[in-house]
Image (cartoon, rainbow, N blue to C red):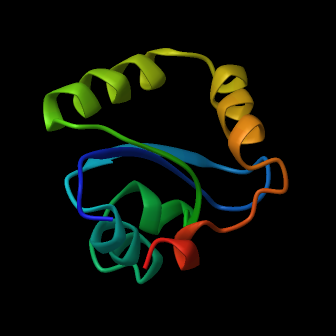
Amino acid sequence: MRAPAVYIMASRRNGTLYTGVTADLSRRVYEHREALRPGFTRRYGCKLLVWYEGYPTISEAIAREKQIKAGSRKKKLALIEAMNPDWRDLYPGLA
């Protein structure tokens, strides 16, 4: 999926969550899964793509990321549960 997107990675169901934004979701999730860059997701093992939304522009995606990050964990869990109640790894369906 080569378009601006906001996404949430998880270490496991109800585990550690990471919210990010990217212009190339497939590439970025691959980087998280393979721990190619140092940082939060590598440190906490956030390798499952559990939620994402696409946007027409990167500025819209960034605004949505800020909104999600400002929200509570409860709101993030509700987003995930609404799109992906089984907490499946959505990465295989991107390609």
* Quadrant assignment for the C terminus: bottom left
On screen, residue 55 above or below 11: above
**Depth check, front residue: 95 or 17:** 95
Which residue is situated farthest in the right direction here? 86
| Residue drawn at (33%, 65%) of the image | 1
Q: Please provide percent x and percent y for residue 70.
A: 45, 16
**Rendered residue at 47%/71% (across/down):** 94
Most foreground residue, 93 or 70: 93
Q: Front-most of 21 and 5?
A: 5
Count the numbered circles shown. Answer: 0
In the displayed structure image, the side of residue 14 where residue 48 appears, left or right: left
Location of residue 56 in the rendering, given as x and y in whole percent from the top left corner: 22, 37
Q: Quadrant of residue 89?
A: bottom right
Q: What residue is rendered at 73% in x and 61% in y?
A: 12
Q: Quadrant of residue 67?
A: top left
Give the vertical position of 15 relative to 90 (above or below).
above
Q: Residue at x 27, y 21 (%)?
A: 63
Residue 47 pos. (x, y %): 55, 69
